[in-house]
Amino acid sequence: MLVKLKTDVVVISLGGSLICPDGLDVPFLKKFRALIEDFPEKKFSIVCGGGKLARNYASGAGEITAVSEKDLDWIGIRSTHLHAEVVRALFDDFAYPEIIVNPTKKLRTKKMILVAGGWKPGWSTDMDAVLLAKNIGAKLVINLSNIDHVYDKDPRKYKDAKKIVEISWDAFLKHIVGEKWKPGMNTPFDPVASREAKKAGIDVIVTDGRDIENLRHILEKATFFKGTVIHR
């Protein structure tokens, strides 16, 4: 798949499933940090998701009492903040000293790395990544999770699920994720963020973040790689 990557600014949506699948994934985070530090000419904005941690906390709270969707969202958002604090700390002086919680706020800094968490109820950190991309003028978000492509149906349930290499936002919204956001929703890219990306003319690459060399290939050449491109 051939895409054009703006070479000086990179927005990465880093799934919580990569940061903390069951506990903090130290080997992955070491590799991820080393890769980012290999590109000192770039400026990275890394938006951290909540993943399994957020879902576990929300599920546990729901077993105790009826929890509103707004409160479930806030549980997820706070989980992303914890992940973001960990990732920010890994980069020490290379990173802006505070995590970004409002992706629309103008920020002047010479730091190489910004690290963000969730902002508001009603969407996932996919939306925050899109809003941050809009804020800094980026036209591509690299969405890292634990899936290598978008599929036409859940490959964990259906053996005949087919990989999608390229898809339009219209088709993605109609056939893959639908229109409505729910707290804890586990999709390749959330529907609210998808509509905003479509409106803003932002493309998204969905790829397996655990494949560090594949991510390196995207950052180096923005040319042939494993993943799905969702585009205008």
Image (cartoon, rainbow, N blue to C red):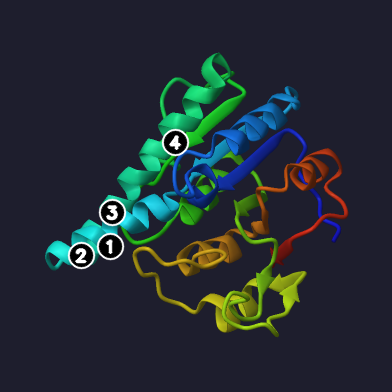
> Residue 84 shows which numbered tag?
4
Q: Measuring 54% from the left and 52% from the top, which residue is drawn there?
A: 130
Between disc 2 and disc 4, the foreground one is: 2
Query: At which x and y percent is residue 68?
Result: 18, 65
Say which quarter of the image contains residue 161: bottom right
Of residues 109 and 22, which is closer to you in this image?
A: 22
Determine which residue is flagged by label 3. 57
Query: Relative to 27, is 191 on the left or the right?
Result: left
User: Of label 4 and label 3, which has the lower sequence position?
Assistant: 3
What is the distance, in whole Å, between disc 2 and disc 1 at their CAs?
Answer: 5 Å
Query: Looking at the picture, which amino acid does disc 2 mark?
Result: Gly
- Secondary element under disc 4, as helix, strand or loop, is helix
Marks 2 and 1: CB-CB under 8 Å? yes
Query: At which x and y percent is residue 37?
Result: 69, 24
Mark 2: few, some, or many residues within 10 Å (few <14, many ≥20)?
few
Query: At which x and y percent is residue 137?
Result: 62, 42
> Residue 62 shows which numbered tag?
2
Determine which residue is flagged by label 1. 59
Q: Measuring 39% from the left and 70% from the top, which residue is drawn there?
A: 181
Marks 1 and 3: CB-CB under 8 Å? yes
Between disc 4 and disc 3, the foreground one is: 3
What is the distance, in whole Å, between disc 4 and disc 3 at their CAs?
Answer: 17 Å
Query: Looking at the picture, which amino acid does disc 4 mark?
Result: Ala
